[in-house]
Image (cartoon, coloured by chain):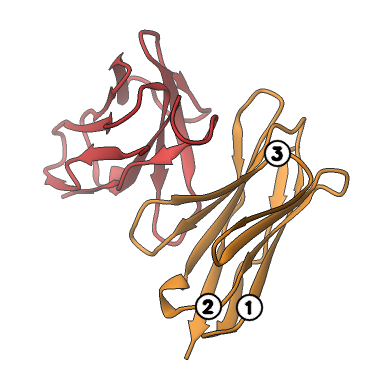
Chain colours: A orange, B red
């Protein structure tokens, strides 16, 4: 079966750095996505990785290792507004998006 | 770029009535649109995938006669919840994918909160 694992919940302090991990086992791979979803709102696109390595976008970076079936989202200089759920999703060989259950990130002052 | 709108943002209806939700890609052509449902504190659940001009593909367990999807143009898809019941109360979110921004990326609308009394 297809599976995406990410921690259910994480807590971090304002101004700090946090890394949210995602491991996946899918039938084929055509890219990995990270989305942010605030409570009661729809997801917003953060990043897309299809090749190994690190993609940096301001305070957010996403890393991919296809051989390990592993990705992480790194958030720097955390702000209170970063409190949200972070969803990892992988596009499989049929170009279907397989969603993780999301990681709820709680930022404390 | 890559803006998706959804209308209405919330709706309250009586049991047995039908509700139509619109999803529009405002600044790009969406070759594929997706409809999701999300219950409180739960994951996104894909309901169906639709391509412009063809019938939608429904996920297992989703009743196609109850959730009618029309994708009449490259910028508009509609979801009609027919004969709605309280258990259909949920957050319905559409997403669109096409020639916008990063290819193969789904961009989400703001969602529609449906409450069936």
SS at badge 2? loop
State the residue at coordinates (38%, 64%): A39
Could you tell me how far apart the alpha carbons at marks 3 and 1 are, in whole angstroms? 24 Å
- In front: B102, or B82? B102
SS at badge 3? loop
State the residue at coordinates (63%, 26%): A95
- In front: B43, or A86? A86
Where does label 3 land, which residue?
Answer: A50
Residue B28, position in %: x, y? Answer: 34, 27
Q: Is residue B8 above or below residue A46?
A: above
In the image, is B68 to the left or to the right of A54? Answer: left
In the image, is A16 to the left or to the right of B41? Answer: right
Q: Is residue B76 above or below residue A2?
A: above
Asked if disc 1 and disc 2 are in contact, CB closer than 8 Å, the reply is: yes
Instruction: Tell me, for residue A78, which label it has, or none.
Output: 2
State the residue at coordinates (33%, 60%): A40
């Amino acid at each position: 079966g297809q599976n995406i694992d990410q921690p259910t919940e994480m807590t971090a302090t304002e101004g700090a750095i946090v890394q949210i991990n995602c491991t996946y086992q899918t039938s084929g791979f055509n890219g990995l996505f990270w989305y942010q979803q605030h409570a009661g709102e729809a997801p917003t696109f953060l990043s897309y990785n299809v090749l190994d390595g690190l993609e940096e976008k301001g305070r957010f970076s996403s890393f991919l290792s296809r051989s390990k079936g592993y990705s992480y989202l790194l958030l720097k200089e955390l702000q209170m507004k970063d409190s949200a759920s972070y969803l990892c999703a992988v596009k499989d060989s049929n170009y279907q998006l397989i969603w993780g259950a999301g990681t709820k990130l709680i930022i404390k002052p | 770029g890559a803006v998706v709108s959804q209308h209405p943002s919330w709706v309250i209806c009586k049991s047995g009535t039908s509700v139509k939700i619109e999803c529009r890609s405002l600044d790009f052509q969406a070759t594929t649109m997706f409809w999701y449902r999300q219950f409180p504190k739960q994951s996104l659940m894909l309901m169906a995938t639709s391509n412009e001009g063809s019938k939608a593909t429904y996920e297992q367990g989703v009743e196609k006669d109850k959730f009618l999807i029309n994708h009449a143009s490259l910028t508009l898809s509609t979801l009609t919840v027919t004969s709605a019941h309280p258990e259909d109360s949920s957050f319905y979110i559409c997403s669109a994918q096409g020639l916008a921004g990063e290819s193969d990326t789904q961009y989400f609308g703001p969602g529609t909160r449906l409450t069936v009394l």
